[in-house]
Image (tube, grey):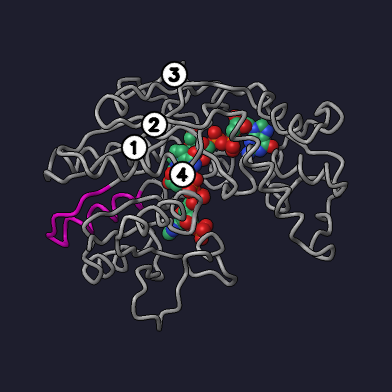
Amino acid sequence: MKRALITGITGQDGSYLADLLLEKGYEVHGIVRRSSSFNTRRLDHIYRDPHDSDRRLMLHYGDVSDASRLVTLLMRIRPDEVYHLAAQSHVRVSFDEPEHTGDTTGMGTTRLLEAILMSGRDIRYYQASSSEMFGATPPPQNEQTAFHPRSPYGAAKVYSYWMTRNYREAHGMFAVNGILFNHESPRRGETFVTRKIARAAARIKAGLDRYVYLGNLDAVRDWGYAPEYVEGMWQMLQLDRPDDYVLATGVGSTVREFVEHCFAHVCLDWHDHVRHDEAYLRPAEVDALVGDASKAREEFGWSARTPVDRLAQIMVDAELEQLATKTPETWSAPPFADSRTFREHVAPAVPR
Ligand code: NAP
Ligand code: GDD
C-alpha cells in the first residue's frame, strides 16, 4: 500500500486529494493545524474513528512554521509521496499579512523540503505552485512564461517554486511544481470570489440577502473544477522524471461573467443585486490569467473537462441544496444584512 502525506489536507484541494488517494488504495496522512474550533469540516465524509483498525486516513497536528515537527512527522510516517498544499492562500490577505504569508507560503516549503532531505528517504514531492506567479505578465501563460508576481502571496510562491527546482537540481529529489490556475468547487473557501458569488446568488434567491458587495469585476481568471486538478497533481508524481507543469482550462472569463452565470442560473438580474465596495480591491491587481496546459496534455493526457458556466451551476446548486437542508434557525442572515462574510468585512479598506 502506498503512503501519502498531505499538508493542507483540511483545505479545498487537500480534501479532494484525500478522496482521490483513498479511492486509489493509499494510506493517507494529513497535517492539521491546532485550532480552538474544528477545522476538519471538509474531511467529515471520510473521517474514521481512530479506534477503527482498518482506517486509512490519519490526521496529525502540525504546522509548516514548525520545522522540528515536520522532521518528526516525516520520520514517523515514512511517506512515499508528499503533497505540499499548506499555505496562507488568500491573495488579498497577503497584503495585510505579508510576513506571515512569507513564513508559511514561502519558508514552509523550505522547511518541508529540508525535512524530506534529512529523512534520507526516496520521497516524491509535489509543490502547489500558482498562476499568481505570472502576475503582470500577459496571457496566455505556460511553463516558459516569465514570473512577475503582484502580491506577497505571489512572491512567496515564486520563492517556493525555485526552492523546489533547486532541491531537484542540487539533491536529485523527485520534486515537481504544479503551476495551477484557479480551480473552484463547492468546497472553496467562502472569501474567494467564485464561492462568494455562488453563495450570494443562492441566498438572494432564498430571500436571505439583497446585495453582494464585490471589488474588481474586470479581472480575468481561468476557472476550472478542483476535483479534476487534484487528479493532475497525482499524475505528476507518477511520471518517470520530475518536471513542472501548468494545469488550466485555457479559457478566461471576467468576474462579471462569473456573476452573470451564477445569477442567470437562479433567474435573477445581477444588476439588481451586485454593489461595489472598494475594500475588495487590491493594492496591485493581477488583470488576466489564462493558462496553456498543452504540456500536461501531451505528456500525461491531462485536460480540464468542466466549462466555467457549468462550474458556476455546480457551485450555485450546492449552495441551494445546503440552504434547503438547513433548519430556518441556522439560516439567519449574517450581521451585515448583505453577503459580506465576517472575515472579509474585517479586512481594512485599501490603502491601509
Ligand atoms: P485552502 O483551501 O486555503 O487550503 C489551505 C490549507 O493550508 C488549509 O488546510 C490550511 O489549514 C492549511 N494551512 C494554512 N497555513 C498553515 C500552516 N501554517 N501550517 C499548516 N497548514 C496550514 O487552499 P486550496 O485552494 O486548497 O489550495 C491548496 C494549495 O494550492 C495552496 O498552497 C494554494 O496556495 C495553492 N493554489 C491554489 C489554487 C486554487 O485556485 N485553489 C491555485 C494555485 C495554487 P486550515 O484549514 O486550518 O486553514
Ligand atoms: N476574493 C475576492 N472578493 N475577489 C474579488 C472580489 C471580492 O469581493 N471582487 C472582485 N474580486 C477579484 C479579485 O480582485 C481577483 O482579481 C479575482 O476576483 C479572483 O480573486 P480570488 O477568488 O480571491 O482568487 P485569486 O485569483 O486572487 O487567487 C486564487 O487563485 C490563485 C491562482 O491564480 C487563490 O486560490 C490563490 O491561492 C491561487 O494561487
In the picture of the structure, the residue carrying the numbered disc 3 is 137
Element assignment for label 3: loop
In the picture of the structure, the residue carrying the numbered disc 2 is 247
Q: Quadrant of ligand 2?
A: top right
Magenta residue span: 107-125
Please report whichever mark, 4 or 2, sits nearer to the chain's N-terminal start: 4
Main SS, magenta region, reads helix
Residue flagged by tag 2: what amino acid is it? Leu
Label of residue 227 in the image: 4
In-image side of 307 versus 200 (left or right):
left
The C terminus appears in which quarter of the rendering? top right
Percent coordinates x, y for residue 115 in the rendering: 23, 59
- Ligand 1 under 8 Å from disc 1 Cβ: yes
Query: Residue at point 76% right, 39% down?
Result: 201
Between the C-alphas of marks 4 and 2, the distance is 12 Å
Residue flagged by tag 1: what amino acid is it? Gly
In the picture of the structure, the residue carrying the numbered disc 1 is 178
Between the C-alphas of marks 3 and 1, the distance is 18 Å
